[in-house]
Image (cartoon, rainbow, N blue to C red):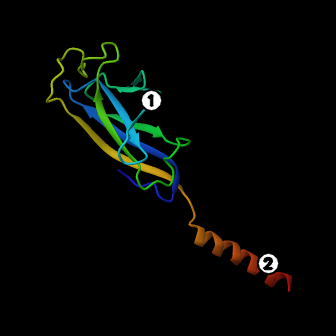
Amino acid sequence: MVSTSGYTDVVLTFDQRNTNTASRYWELQYTTDGSAWTPYAVSGANTNGGLYEFTASTWVNGLTVDFTGVSGVDNNALFGVRILAAYDPASGTSYSPTNTGSTYGTSGTATFDYVTFSGTSVPEPGRLALLVFGIAGFGLRRRR
C-alpha cells in the first residue's frame, strides 16, 4: 500500500530478478479502495499477454508502470499494488519456470529492487490560495 495523496500522474518503477525455477509470468494488480484488486495489463519489453515475462535468471532493470489516466489512482490514500506469480498464458492452469531448461518449483524466488513511486505534486488548496492572494497583492501594490 502506498498513499498517493497530494500526487497525480503516478509512475511505479522497479527491477526484478527471478531464480531459474521461479514462475516465468507475473501479474501486476492495483487497488484504489484498499481491498478490491484490478489486473494492470503491462506492455512493452519483457511482457506477454499483459503479464511480465522473464526468460533468464538475470536482473531486468527499469520495469515501468504508468498509472497516469487510471481512474482513482491520483490523490488516493488507499492506493496499492501487488505483483503475483501467474499461470502460463498458454496453459492457463500451470506455472512455467523462468528458465526453459528448469522445472517450476514452489521454492523459486523473485527479488525486487529499486521500487520507486513518483508523481506530480498537487499544490494544497490553502497554499494555492496564498499564492494567488500574494500575486494579487503585488499587482495592487505595483498599480499604486
Does residue 37 lie above or below 41 as drawn?
Answer: below
Give the distance between the C-alpha atoms of the residues marked 1 and 2, in whole angstroms.
50 Å
Q: Amino acid at mark 2?
A: Gly
x and y, in percent, of residue 119 in the image: 50, 52
Does residue 142 lie above or below 9 as drawn?
Answer: below
x and y, in percent, of residue 60 in the image: 34, 33
Asked if the residue under mark 2 is in contact with the one under mark 1, i.e. CB atoms within 8 Å, the reply is no
- Which of 137/14 is in front? 137
- Which of 125/120 is in front? 125
- Residue drawn at x 29%, y 41% as measured from the top left: 112
- Which mark is on residue 139? 2
Does residue 130 lie above or below 112 as drawn?
Answer: below
- Residue drawn at x 24%, y 15% as measured from the top left: 100
Quarter holding residue 85: top left
- Which of 24/124 is in front? 124
- Which mark is on residue 77? none
- Which mark is on residue 41? 1
Q: Residues within 10 Å of mark 2 (few under 14, many from 20)?
A: few
Quarter holding residue 86: top left
In this rendering, would 135 be left or right of 11? right
x and y, in percent, of residue 43 in the image: 47, 28
- Residue drawn at x 25%, y 38% as measured from the top left: 111
Q: Nearer the viewer, mark 1 or mark 2?
A: 1
Task: Identify the residue at the far bottom of this view.
Answer: 144
Callout count: 2
Q: Amino acid at mark 1?
A: Ala
- Quadrant of the image for the C terminus? bottom right
